[in-house]
Image (cartoon, rainbow, N blue to C red):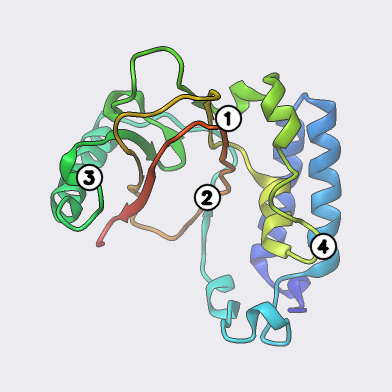
């Protein structure tokens, strides 16, 4: 375990957890957050002594001066235009290398962790559900699956994300539904400075449904 108490990042994460806890009125999710943060504090950040991390030294990344977002932030017009340009250039660069993309694809654009409807192109049949994860908390399938797939025990980063997430997306594909084109999820990061985004996404695909998902990320300077 890295001595996290000596790292400024840890203090920032504690403050972020306190803010995230106050913002969440769902008692069941709040209990999950509390359990997750207890696990994160007990595990600490992984080191080379951890079997799954013995080839990856995370310590240099933990020393970065991150901008830790604690609330949902609206894009300014300048940021929106920057995100649109970044996405357009990104799609031009990858359209010939990604399977299915050259044939056309639906597009879900996530800018700095938030769904951007203006840049997204989604099915219009009303059967395919996409929404911010906070709006899905009352959905039956969300309640059935959220927090049950990614294992917190023994995984500090999953525990940290479960405790601190404050945005993300929820996708629900109904049973027997077939999407006629791939869904390309494009993550766009517009900030120039190091940023620590704690987003949580959940995709639930119904029985015998068929959907092909492509996921890419583009940031400043990439």
Query: Which numbered disc covers residue 101?
Result: 3
Which of labels 1 and 3 is toward the front? 1
Q: Position of residue 90 (x, y in %)?
A: 20, 51
Q: Nearer the viewer, residue 92 or 12?
A: 92
**In the image, 34: left or right of 11?**
right
Q: Residues within 10 Å of mark 2 (few under 14, many from 20)?
A: many
The quadrant of the rendering that contains the N terminus is bottom right
Query: Disc 1 to disc 2, how far (Cα)?
Result: 29 Å
User: Which image quarter: residue 153?
Assistant: bottom right
Q: Nearer the viewer, residue 99 or 35?
A: 99
User: Which image quarter: residue 53?
Assistant: bottom right
Q: Position of residue 170 (x, y in %)?
A: 55, 31
Query: Disc 2 to disc 3, how far (Cα)?
Result: 27 Å
Residue at image position (59%, 31%) is: 207
Residue furthest top as drawn: 126
Does label 2 or label 3 sit earlier along the sequence? 3
Query: Disc 4 to disc 2, how far (Cα)?
Result: 19 Å
**In the image, 45: left or right of 28?**
left
Asked if the residue at tag 2 contacts the one at tag 4, i.e. Cβ–Cβ closer than 8 Å, the answer is no
Q: Position of residue 35 (x, y in %)?
A: 86, 48
Which of labels 2 and 3 is toward the front? 3
Which of labels 1 and 4 is toward the front? 1
**In the image, 144: left or right of 93?**
right
**In the image, 90: left or right of 187?**
left
Residue at image position (42%, 43%) is: 112
Does label 4 or label 2 sit earlier along the sequence? 4
Residue at image position (26%, 62%) is: 222
> Which residue lies under the disc numbered 1?
206
> Which residue lies under the disc numbered 2?
197
Does label 1 or label 4 sit earlier along the sequence? 4
Does label 1 or label 3 sit earlier along the sequence? 3
> Which residue lies under the disc numbered 4?
41
């Amino acid at each position: 375990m890295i001595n996290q108490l000596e790292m400024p990042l840890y203090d920032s994460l504690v403050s972020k957890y306190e803010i995230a806890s106050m913002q969440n009125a769902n008692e069941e999710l709040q209990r999950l957050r509390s359990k997750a943060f207890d696990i994160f504090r007990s595990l600490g950040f992984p080191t080379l002594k951890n079997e799954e991390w013995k080839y990856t030294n995370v310590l240099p990344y933990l020393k970065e001066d991150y901008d830790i977002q604690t609330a949902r932030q609206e894009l300014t017009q300048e940021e929106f235009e920057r995100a649109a340009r970044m996405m357009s250039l990104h799609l031009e660069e990858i359209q010939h290398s990604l399977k299915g993309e050259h044939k056309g694809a639906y597009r879900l654009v996530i800018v700095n962790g938030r769904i951007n409807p203006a840049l997204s192109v989604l099915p219009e049949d009303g059967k395919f559900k996409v929404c911010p994860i906070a709006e899905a908390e009352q959905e039956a399938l969300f309640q059935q699956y959220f927090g049950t797939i990614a294992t917190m025990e023994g995984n500090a980063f999953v525990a940290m994300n479960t405790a601190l997430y404050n945005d993300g997306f929820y996708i629900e594909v109904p049973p027997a539904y077939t999407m006629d084109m791939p869904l390309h999820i494009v993550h766009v990061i517009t900030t120039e400075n190091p940023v620590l985004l704690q987003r949580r996404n959940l995709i639930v695909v119904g029985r015998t449904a068929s959907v092909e998902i492509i996921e890419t990320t583009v940031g400043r300077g990439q």
